[in-house]
Amino acid sequence: MNLTPGEAFLQTAIKRLKYYKSLGDKTFSQLDPNDFHFTPDAESNSIAVIIQHIWGNMMSRWTDVLNSDGEKPWRERDLEFVERKLPSAELLNLWEEGWQCFLGALESFKEEDLLKTITIREESLSLIDAINRQLAHYPYHIGQIVFIGKMIKQAKWTSLSIPKGQSQQYNQSPEIKDPAKKFEK
């Protein structure tokens, strides 16, 4: 199947983002409910707070993205960074809701949408730039989630990538080397 450059961009962006979501999912599956609220120090965010922030960002940015500013008047960004001690099941619901909103928006776009101008905080940018912005923003926070999960679980942590000292075995295995390819249509 021949894809246009815009179609290829959207497909690869969705595939990469689904991979990063899976890293969060795999981290959550290793955690106990109280682990979501662990903070390494007073200046750090817990996994719960990071989930709250990602949810708020996704819901605000990607709800009606082509017709309204990505910083919705109902968003209370500062409150996203307040530890609310939500149960892990509720945090996971926020996580899923945010991703459904974001991926649903991406899956609805057509190539001709990519160069459309949207706004975030009343600043104009192309839709393709907004997607690229999130391709950096969300994995940044997911990396934090994974790192905190590793700190919590320590020796009980199951690696989400190539375990230390096993690169050669991994490279020689018949597995797909790019983990994001598992999310291709």
Image (cartoon, rainbow, N blue to C red):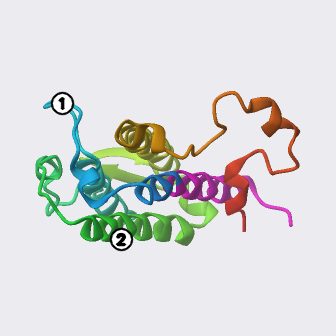
- Relative image position of residue 77 (x, y in whole percent): 17, 50
Q: Is residue 167 left or right of residue 15?
A: right
Q: Which residue is mark 2?
A: 97
Query: Which of the two marks, 2 or 1, is nearer to us in this view?
Result: 1
Q: How far is the residue under mark 2 from the one under mark 1?
A: 29 Å
Q: Which residue is mark 1?
A: 41
Residue 149 occupies which quadrant of the picture? top left
Task: Say the numbered circle drawn on residue 21.
Answer: none
Q: Is residue 25 left or right of residue 13?
A: left
Secondary structure state at the residue bearing disc 2: helix
- Relative image position of residue 122 (x, y in whole percent): 25, 47
What's under tag 1, amino acid-wise? Asp
Residue density around tag 1, few if under 14, some if 14–19, many if 20 or more, within 10 Å = few
Give the residues in magenta: 1-22
| Residue drawn where x is 59% and y is 59% of the image | 14
> How many tags in the picture?
2
Front-most of residues 109 and 160? 160
- Relative image position of residue 67 (x, y in whole percent): 34, 66
| Residue drawn where x is 35% and y is 39% of the image | 148
Is the residue 146 above or below the residue 31 in the image? above
| Residue drawn where x is 48% and y is 44% of the image | 157
**Which quadrant, please, contains the N terminus?**
bottom right
Report if residue 99 is visible in the image.
yes
What's under tag 2, amino acid-wise? Glu
Front-most of residues 27 and 177? 27
Secondary structure state at the residue bearing disc 1: loop
**Which quadrant, please, contains the C terminus?**
bottom right
